[in-house]
Image (cartoon, rainbow, N blue to C red):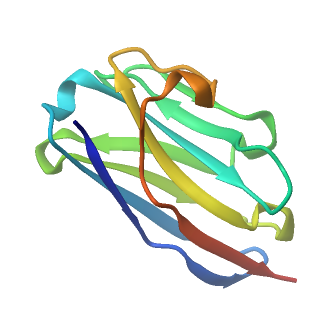
């Protein structure tokens, strides 16, 4: 079983930055692909970014390309999401997810989830 704990959410003005962190435990971190998803009330969970087990492949949803960066620190069992140039439409609960080795963009393919961290962007 994999446990995931997100942190780093909060309130930021439009144009500002936040860095989300997700600490993983329960399985060798370097065997996990990690993803970030977000969800707003009444909408389905949306893919944001993902990184494969080795860190050499990353994937982004089109609207965040060039603004968000996913990275992983295997020594700290942590995945990060650096979010720059935030927009009001980025506001959501952000979830960290994990699966074995290969990153995908489909939330249904991730068996492990964190509890989420709220990101609020004021205009």
Q: Give the residue drawn at x 52%, y 73%.
A: 9
Vertical position of residue 62 compared to residue 24: above or below: above
Q: Nearer the viewer, residue 45 or 15?
A: 45
Give the residue drawn at x 84%, y 71%: 88
**Residue 55's x, y, as percent?**
34, 26
User: Where 56 falls versus 46 (above or below)?
Assistant: above
List x then y, in percent, for residue 82: 51, 57
Q: Nearer the viewer, residue 100 or 15?
A: 100
Q: Is residue 35 above or below residue 33?
A: below
Does residue 84 appear in the picture of this structure? no
x 38%, y 25%: residue: 99
Q: Is residue 21 visible?
A: yes
Q: Quadrant of the N terminus?
A: top left
In the foreground, 39 or 51? 39
Q: Residue at x 88, y 83 (%)?
A: 123
* Residue 64: quadrant of the picture: top right
Q: Is residue 39 left or right of residue 28?
A: right
In the rendered image, the vertical position of residue 118 relative to residue 41, given as above or below:
below
How many tags in the picture? 0
The spot of residue 43 in percent (x, y) is 84, 50
Which quadrant of the figure has residue 48? Answer: top right
Query: Residue 101 at what x, y percent from top left?
Result: 33, 16
């Amino acid at each position: 079983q994999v446990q995931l704990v997100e942190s780093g959410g909060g309130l930021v003005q439009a144009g500002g930055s936040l860095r989300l962190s997700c600490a993983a435990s329960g399985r060798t971190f370097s065997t996990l692909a990690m993803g970030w998803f977000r969800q707003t009330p009444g909408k389905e969970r949306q893919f944001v970014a993902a990184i494969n087990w080795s860190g050499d492949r990353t994937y982004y949803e089109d609207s965040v390309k060039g603004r968000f960066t996913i990275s992983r620190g295997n020594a700290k069992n942590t995945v990060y999401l650096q979010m720059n140039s935030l927009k009001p439409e980025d506001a959501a609960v952000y979830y960290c997810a994990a699966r074995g080795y290969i990153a995908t963009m489909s939330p249904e393919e991730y068996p492990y989830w964190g509890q989420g961290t709220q990101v609020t962007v004021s205009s």
